[in-house]
Amino acid sequence: MSEEKKFKDSYVLCIGGINVDKKVQLLENLVLETSNPVVSSLSAGGVSRNIAENLGRLGVPVKMLSVAGDDESFTWLEKETEGIIDFSLVEHLKGKTTSNYTAILDLQGDMCLALADMSICEEMTPDWLFSHDEAVKQASLVIADLNLPQETLQALIQLTSLEKIPLAIIPVSGPKMKRIPDDLQGVTWIVVNADESRTRYGEHTLAELATLWQKDGVENIVITKGTKCGVFADATGVVKTFTPIKAEQVCDVTGAGDSFSSGVLYGALKGASLEESIGYGLTNSYYTVQAIETVRKDLNAKSFEKEYQHLKERGLS
């Protein structure tokens, strides 16, 4: 994507969920139907918001288009990323509660249960989107998550396609895959995991899944499978594999997928090849899972380039 000059003069627009994340770390093995000792922490979350923060910390001008409650949760979220994400397009809805998400992590830092109150996202209707159409038209890249209702996502695909604006779709979870329209002509990117892809297409190999995404209209497809080999494909139709480097110590996997997606799209904005962009994604997720934060607070463009080169020397592919 030869967008580097354009994005410097414009901004990336992230559309979707913004929420307060509560992480609850078990101190002992989970025992149901009783009290369990834990430690907990709050962080800013939401797939599109996480991607916006990653890109913002990497020096990309980024705006968030979403809805929130007129409450302390949104005030806290805005303060957490002041100067990193432009929240001026976030619409405050009276009487509504800002989205919130609670993840329960086991002793190894892996998620064993997650609870999400994202009901306010249903207010992001097609009419709401069209009321912000000028913000969409001025973006160099639009990134949307599946907290958008299906009809809104469909309207967004039509709008960005008409305006020839690159669009990336980042799924949230398997259950929300039903929000992706059947026709994806005009979608430039999808970064999705194997389980989410199989929710849509059934049991297939990763290479077959990539081909199915292409048949539905997506130009560039990246399919991940945790620490195992993933696949990617572009408009040529050739499907290739990539292999993550497993982190020596995993602190918290929350945000790993969002950091990967952010790295991939950051590479694309720089004008990198699809393969190089995936390298940026793998680099960001590798270091993110070793940090306690959903988005690394020490992330910046200069150190990120060094991290990328370091992992390339270790055989990143």
Image (tube, grey):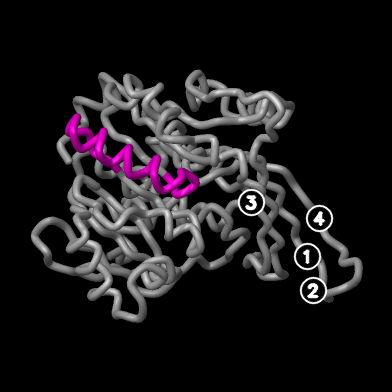
Tell me whether the residue at label 2 lies in contact with that at label 1, contact meaning CB atoms closer than 8 angstroms.
yes
- Is label 2 in a helix, a strand or a loop? loop
* Quarter the C terminus occupies: bottom left
- The location of residue 162, given as percent across then percent down, is 18, 33
* Alpha carbons under labels 4 and 3: distance apart: 13 Å
Are there few (<14), some (14-19), or many (20+) residues within 10 Å of tag 3? some
Whichever of labels 3 and 2 marks the residue nearer the N terminus, that label is 2
Residue at 69% in and 63% down = 105
- Is label 3 in a helix, a strand or a loop? loop
Q: Label 4 sits on what residue type?
A: Val
Q: Which residues are magenta?
A: 145-167
Circle number at residue 292: 3
* Alpha carbons under labels 4 and 1: distance apart: 7 Å
Q: Label 3 sits on what residue type?
A: Ile
Residue at 48% in and 64% down = 174
Question: Which residue is situated farthest in the right direction here?
Answer: 35
Residue labelled with disc 2 = 30
- The location of residue 306, given as percent across then percent down, is 36, 45
> In the rendered structure, does residue 157 fall within the stretch colored magenta?
yes
* Alpha carbons under labels 3 and 2: distance apart: 21 Å
The image shows residue 41, relative to residue 74, as above or below, that is: below
Whichever of labels 4 and 1 marks the residue nearer the N terminus, that label is 1
Circle number at residue 26: 1
Q: Label 2 sits on what residue type?
A: Leu
Residue at 28% in and 41% down = 157
Q: Nearer the viewer, mark 4 or mark 3?
A: 4
Circle number at residue 290: none
Q: Label 1 sits on what residue type?
A: Leu
Tell me whether the residue at label 4 lies in contact with that at label 1, contact meaning CB atoms closer than 8 angstroms.
no
The image shows residue 222, relative to residue 76, as above or below, that is: below
